[in-house]
Amino acid sequence: MIKKVVTKRRLDDFSSIKADYSYWMTKTAEERVEAVELLRRQYHGDSVRLQRSARVVQLVINKRTVGRKKDLADLEALSEE
């Protein structure tokens, strides 16, 4: 049986924020997006609109990863809108 564990922390406890940040920075961008998608599904269900948003985020990650001039120009154009 999996035991549920809840840890209470103060919002001004920056050591836990740094630890969380350090943990997530060890994960790839894809793993972070998957984690957010899992949490979103748990909270909101399978909404088509939010799935499209997740695909857009994945597209941006892919364009940054590839780094072609056209992809970077596309990202620059998106940030200007």
Image: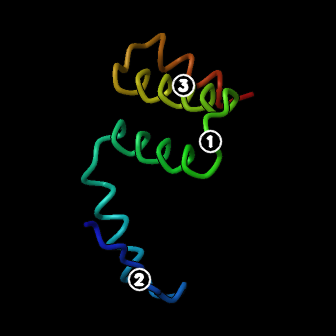
Q: Which residue is identified by label 2?
A: 7
Q: Nearer the viewer, residue 48 or 52?
A: 48
Judging from the image, what secondary structure is the residue with disc 2 in?
loop
Q: Amino acid at mark 1?
A: Gly
- Residue at 39% x, 45% y: name it: 32
Q: Nearer the viewer, residue 4 or 77?
A: 4
Q: Nearer the viewer, residue 60 or 80?
A: 60
Q: Which residue is identified by label 3?
A: 55
Label disc, if present, on residue 45 of the rendered structure: 1
- Residue 69, image x, y percentages: 43, 13
Q: Amino acid at mark 2?
A: Thr
- Residue 74, image x, y percentages: 57, 17
Q: Which class describes the residues within 10 Å of circle 2: few (<14), some (14-19), or many (20+)?
A: few
Q: Residue furthest top?
A: 70
Judging from the image, what secondary structure is the residue with disc 1 in?
loop
Per the model, the C-alpha gap separating discs 2 and 3 is 32 Å
